[in-house]
Every structure is written in C-alpha cells, then in structure tokens.
Amino acid sequence: MTAILQLALDFVDLHRALKVADLAVPAGVDWLEAGTPLIKSEGLDAVRELKKRFPGKTIVADMKIMDAGRIEVEAAAKAGAQLIDVLGTATDATIEECVHAGKNYGAKIVVDLIAVPDPVARARQVEALGADYISVHVAIDEQMRGQDPFATLYAVSHAVKVPVGVAGGINSETAAQAVEHGAAYVIVGGAITKALDPAAATAEIRRALDEGAVIPTTLFKRVGEEEIRRVLEMVSAANLSDALHRGGVLEGIRPLFPGIRVVGRALTVRTYPGDWAKPVEAIDAAQPGDVLVIDAGGVGPALWGELATHSALNKGVAGVVIHGAIRDSGDIVNLKFPAFTRLVMPNAGEPRGFGEIGVPIRIGNVRVETGDWILGDDDGVTVLPQKLAVEYANRAMDVLEKENRIRAEIKEGRTLAEVTDLLRWEKKV
C-alpha cells in the first residue's frame, strides 16, 4: 500500500496556508494538517476553513494536546478535524481522555512522540491506551542540529501494530527512505510550504512515495559538519545574520568591490596599526580555502596590498577581512581577490613583527576565533562560530527557503506587507 502524504501547514497566516494547499492538494496530498502555529494564530477557524475548502480530504489538527484532553479534542472534532494530535509526553490520563473524546466525536487520536525520552516504550504504552496512530517526530530545533528520525521510526514501527507516521525534514530525497523504515504516512512541511512551486514539489514527493524513488534536492534538507561549506555557499551574509538572531556581523567592514563573495574558515591575526609582518606571515600559515581575519584596531596605515594579494592567491587563501586599512585597491579588484576592509588608503606601514597568529580577536562586539566560518558578500561579513556551525548553517538555509516562498508570492502580484500581514503582526503597545 502506498504511504499517505500529509501536508503540514505550519504558517501563522491562514491566507498563505490556503494558497499552498490549493496548489498542493491536486498534486497528490492525502491529508491536510492545520499545523500548531496556524492553530495558535488563527484558532480552530483554520480547521473549519480547511474542512470547508477541501471536503474530500482528511483534516488533521496538530493540537499538541498536553492537558484538558477531552475539551480540546471535542473542540477540534466539532471544527471538522478527523485526526487530532496529543503529545506522547502528556500523562496517561490525558491520552485516555483524548481517546474517549475521540470515540464520542468521531475523531482518531494521533500520539506525537516528539521529545519522548524512550519512544519505543512510550509507543507501546500509548497503543495500549487506545491511540489510533503514532507519529515519530524530530523537532525543528533538533533538525537544525543534523538529527533525522529514521532509526527511531524503524524501531517504533516494528514495536507496535497501529500505523506509524514520521515528521522531521522529509523531502523528495528522503520520502522513500521513510517508507522503507516503516512509515504508513509521511508528514511533509517545508519541502512543500517553502517551495517556489508547491504543486511541483508535491508531485515530486508523491512520485518518490509511489515509486520508491530518490529525487535529489538542494533545498529543504539539513546537513552535518561535512556539508557546512556547501550550505554557506548557497546562502547570503544577510541570511546567516538573520539565523544568528541578527548577529554575527562585523560592523564597518565593507567589500572592496561589488559582486564579491567569500566562504571559508577563519585564520585570525592580531597586529598593530600598519604592522604588516604578521598578516604576511599568516599567508604562509594558512590552509587553502582559509580566510585571513586581521585585527589592526580599525585604523591605518595600510597593512595589505597587491603583493600580499598575489602571495595569498598562490597559497590558495580564499579571501581577507581587515579591521584596518588596505591599499593597491585597483590591482586587487583586477585580481578579483575577495577583500573586505574598514579603510582604503595609499600609505603603508612597516613590518615590525608585533602581534599573534591564530589567537581570538574581537572586531566591534563580535569575537572571532581561528576555525570559525566566514561568509562575506556585497552586504559585508558575518561570522559563524565553529561550535554553532551545523545548527546555524541549517537555520540560515531555513531563512533562505522561507524568503524564496515569500518572493514567489510577491512576484504573483502581492506586496510584502500583504504577504506577511504586516499590520496584523505589529507589536501592540
């Protein structure tokens, strides 16, 4: 039997959720989920509207019930939900109340194992309590750290008899893998809701499920340590800063010329104003692909020029970031070497040899350590600390994906304020 495709509409605006649903349902969606953000934002009117608009489809209310099971199941069922989610971390009493209320009002109960310490044991327990379905769910915040649900899915699906579903970053590459690991239904969110063309994205995932196919995608997947560079090469410095809660930016550091872009690991240099000895020595210490990040106090004279650039290119250095001054700018532009700097001036300093290579430095309010990731483009430079690299590279990709969907809606003729419902979401004082 072909796995069921459930579309998680995790929007906060009903009009955007309905637009994606209108496109995705004809392309192969079986179940429509009013996601938790949508229910929190729009209330159960979201369920009512989905039921009205798609009367032939199964409507799922992802209530994530934790208490007051009877009243919440009753409300969701009366709004039109046929499947209602309760958290596996809820008490047995709450889950039993949900099951009893579901029987009274004609709804099936799904137990979501998100954040359950022992998912196999809990799956067996909630099956005994009367759950109709069980979902193995890797939380978004865990996905950003590179976790996937498949090992847990396999163990749970082989431990119980009720249908088991899966959620957690499923895309066209992994949908078939989900079925192979025991999923009776596959819950897909961002791979459809953030797609430029939700209908085409749905059709690809539908084909992956029906044919057991692996359909490659560059978006809508989360990576581990080995793929950080690939992700950073796809996103912008602005995307990365947004992911870092609007942080990580080296303020006042500007690209030397338009169209500039660099991605690489930092090799830090601390030197004194105009002392170009340690910056030049750092070229020899650098590995191919490194970015030199030089702190000279943000003042001149220049400590980098054409000759240093030639040397860096020969060594395979990816670029340079200078909290200080650079010169020979025209030559560096002609060499197309990615250079970011606070100042440009003609006068150079002298090689005195003060400073250190590979030590932590601070530029403005941002600490930079050797091994941190550097992403520079036309907007400037954002620093991604190496200890946060996997999570926040993934979060930067999530920012890009969301912006792609918004961009597509704007191109269809709506304004940014309309798409984002800006006035509605302004903070009320």
Image (tube, rainbow, N blue to C red):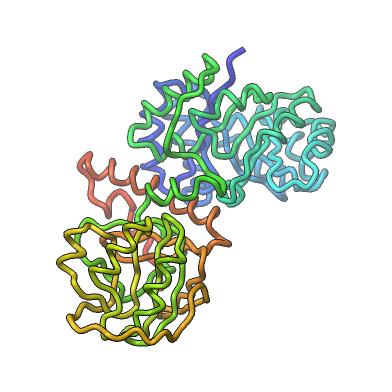
Q: Residue at x 52, y 76 (%)?
A: 359
Above or below 42: residue 31: above
- In the image, residue 77 lies at what x, y percent? 61, 35
Horizontally, residue 206 falls left or right of residue 120, namely: left
Name the residue nearer the viewer: 170 or 360. 360
The N terminus: image quadrant? top right
Look at the image and tell me whether residue 268 can be seen.
yes
Above or below 182: residue 121: below
Figure quadrant of residue 342: bottom left
Q: Residue at x 47, y 62 (%)?
A: 384
Figure quadrant of residue 152: top right
Counting every numbered tag in the picture gives 0
Name the residue nearer the viewer: 151 or 82. 151
- In the image, residue 308 lies at what x, y percent? 30, 69
Horizontally, residue 339 falls left or right of residue 206, namely: left
Look at the image and tell me whether residue 238 can be seen.
no
Q: Residue at x 23, y 50 (%)?
A: 415
Name the residue nearer the viewer: 338 or 19. 338
Q: Residue at x 61, y 41 (%)?
A: 75
Above or below 111: residue 296: below
Horizontally, residue 411 falls left or right of residue 245, namely: left
- In the image, residue 66 lies at what x, y percent? 70, 49
The C terminus: image quadrant? bottom left
Figure quadrant of residue 236: bottom left
Horizontally, residue 57 falls left or right of residue 99, namely: left
- In the image, residue 382 lies at what x, y percent? 39, 65
Name the residue nearer the viewer: 380 or 50. 380
